[in-house]
Image (cartoon, rainbow, N blue to C red):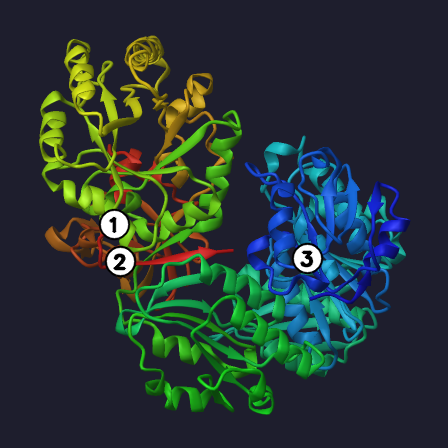
Amino acid sequence: MIQPIDFSAFSSNYSGGNQEFSEKGLIDKIEIDTRKIQSGATALFVALDGSRQNGADFAKIAHSLKVRNFILPLKAKSNVPHLDDSNILWTENPLDALQELAKANRFQFDGPVIGITGSNGKTIVKEWLAQVLGQDVKVYKSPKSYNSQIGVALSALGIQSVHQVALLEAGISKPGEMDRLKKIIEPEIGIFTNIGSAHDENFENLETKIREKCRLFANVRFLIYRKDHALVQHFLEKTFDSDRLVSWSDVPGADYTLSVKKEKKGARILMIAPDLRTYTFATAFDDPASLENIRHVIVCSMVLGLKPEKIQAGVKLLHAVDMRLTLKSGIRQCLLIDDSYNNDLAGLEIALEFMSQQRTPSGRKILILSEMVQEGNEELMAQKISGLVSHYQIDLLVGVGQLFLRYKNFFSPQCLFFSGNSEVLAGIEKLNLDRDLILVKGARKFQFEDIIRLLEAEVHETVLEINLNALRHNFNFYKTLLSPDIKIMVMVKAFAYGGGAAEIANHLQQIGADYLAVAYIDEGVYLRQKGVTLPVMVMNPDTRYLDLIQEYKLEPVIYSLRSLEGLSSLALNQSEELPIHLELDTGMRRLGMAEEDLKDLLTHLEQHPQIKIKGIFTHLAGADEAIHEEFTLTQLTRFRELSDSIMNRLPARPIRHALNSAGIVRFPDQAFDMVRLGIGLHGVEVNQLEQNKLEAVATLKTVVSQVKKVRKGESIGYGRQGRMQQDGEIAILAIGYADGYDRRFGNGNAFVMVRGKKAWTIGNICMDMCMVDVSGLQVKEGDEVILFGKGPSLQYLAAQIGAIPYELLTGIGMRVKRNYILD
């Protein structure tokens, strides 16, 4: 929901297009996705193109949902069906118009706007600053990580007159992007968090990247930065007037000195202000990244004029902010979406959209929601929440807080309302949970983490996190290598390479995959039972189970005359058309039809017209290695010749596909009609040609169960294989080879990351646990440990033991909980 805007007035002043108006258009909602449209009467639909979709193609759907205000691309004017009684702004670039609209809304706002950029910490600084400032004033902050070209525009449109200060973050991935964002945000105060390696490949060097990011701050009154970051400090101090710069550092020499004293639980920050007064701030955090972010918050709060005692009260209450939506296992076979850290309307809609994309186990969709503390008019807010609950077809709303009790009449009688967190905990049995999908979302003061702990299943402390944003990123990267008309089949066999077939398949369905492939019929049946509707190819089907193939609309692969004859005999009296995929052996020497079988194959198909070839494909034996390039090209040529000869006898053209993840990178011009994306989706580029373009999807995590002091020479673990080289400490981790952490990683053959530092294994890997040397790392029981992810990578670990990344992913045990993350 945005501040009401006169769309007709905006359009008449916008120079980048031409208008068709039938009446005055007052708008209070911006829609870029027709699936989210609740009430179109006062909405504006902006047709933004996606990687495979033209936004204008959805204008008619938006119109059917009563939308009467549109920003549409001029190039589509001849193709868009007539939209009766509509106000239309036709423009070369709808994104430009959206950003101009956002700019107009931002400049109606009189309060200070704080712009935040940098490589890391932007979102955390924004969230924590909102928590501190929100004690006294109404704060608007951009939702989650909305810092892109579209995200910043949508964020700026959310600022309303009720707000007193606005926090907007900005992120860029290439030169030229910040100029556009700066025109929207135009901050009065800027925060430059730090500089790192993200998107380095798109910038000449770090100084170039700093320069691009600093374009956001061209007109700021004050710019806050950490002086200890030498490159940032050097650039800012040579570029900006000194009276606009506000620096802080661990050591004297900056405007604010903020030194840290670690304590048993957390830390104390000792600050010397510019007037030489000293202040102390206590925090529960003690890791370097959090302490840096907190100090940015303290300095910005001081610049804004907050009293130090008020800042201390806010800092003391700061909590870990997980900006990610997390899908996890719950009690009584429920699925749980954890978004308990915060609550606002924009974030609620994002969370509900994520919820709508998940499979519902078999029960209800339940929303546990607290009242919102920064949203202004309570009655209007209750109406908006009611509209979202209805639109996203929530079966049961559990409302917590006085707002819900005051406005019960806006909600159905089936809703449950509680005054506070303790009542929910005491009344959880009233929900009668059983295989439900539950979204928990609440403002900090309601402490919904207690509800999460109650609802979360008691499981192993080791977790495999699947980052759905990274998965989407990798999927889109491979799409950029291909022509727009090339389809993508994604391999989700073997539990989607260990990541969870149903959850990943459902997400792939949302982001535009064309086909899925599994190894066996039961895998395909499972996907159908979990709500997957994409075409599913079964690579090694048992054709005796034709009833399951037909019931669940699966498409079997035929790789021999015997398998074809077996399928034909069962389908002899069937009238229903049966689609198959034909596998040809062009050199892999695994499953597949040989050339000498093709004549009999075609004769057989002519005798069984109910069997239709939907696709023809082959497997490449060495597409991932340059040494096999000649052989691979021979395979591709052979495939083209054999498939051409088959297609010349067929009445319809089947889909042809040969390239795997490695082949897409090496031979994109040989994509035929479709490609098969497998390990590349998970962030592993086996050619090692484009690895820096991919993101790690899976992160394996565990916790430290115990820390022990061990003396030099003492033995550790079974067989006494581990030996301490000096006095030190070891940590016992809650993971072993039964969880998929290979025995070969023992005795220093692998490292883990704990508190941001490497800790190498020591001793043999046990069935349920292992040990690492943490001497000098100040590790504590309960600390999080990363076994693989961004570091160490799957490729590194596989190379350490002579394995391949596939083995490590598919070997993760089923007792390891899978959590699905949307950043």
Q: Is residue 713 left or right of residue 205?
A: left
Q: Residue at point 67% right, 49% down?
A: 150
Residue with the mark numbered 3: 67
> Compared with residue 739, is residue 652 higher up or lower down, i.e. above or below?
above
In the picture, the quarter occupied by the N terminus is: bottom right
Picture quarter containing residue 196? top right
Q: Is residue 37 left or right of residue 528?
A: right
Q: Nearer the viewer, mark 2 or mark 3?
A: 3
Residue 822 can be seen in this image: yes
Neighbor class of circle 1 (other Cα within 10 Å; few <14, some 14-19, many 20+) is many
Residue type beneath disc 2: Val
Badge 2 vs badge 1, beta-carbon distance below 8 Å: yes
Q: Secondary structure at mark 3?
A: loop
Q: Is residue 323 left or right of residue 604?
A: right
The type of residue carrying mark 3 is Val
Identify the residue under disc 2. 816
Residue drawn where x is 61% and y is 78% of the image: 372
Q: Which mark is residue 114?
A: none
Foreground tag (1 vs 3): 3
Q: Position of residue 26 (x, y in %)?
A: 79, 63
Q: What is the quadrant of residue 158 in the picture?
A: bottom right
Q: Position of residue 710 (x, y in %)?
A: 26, 61
Number of the label disc, if any, that sits on residue 812:
1
List x then y, in percent, for residue 567: 13, 31
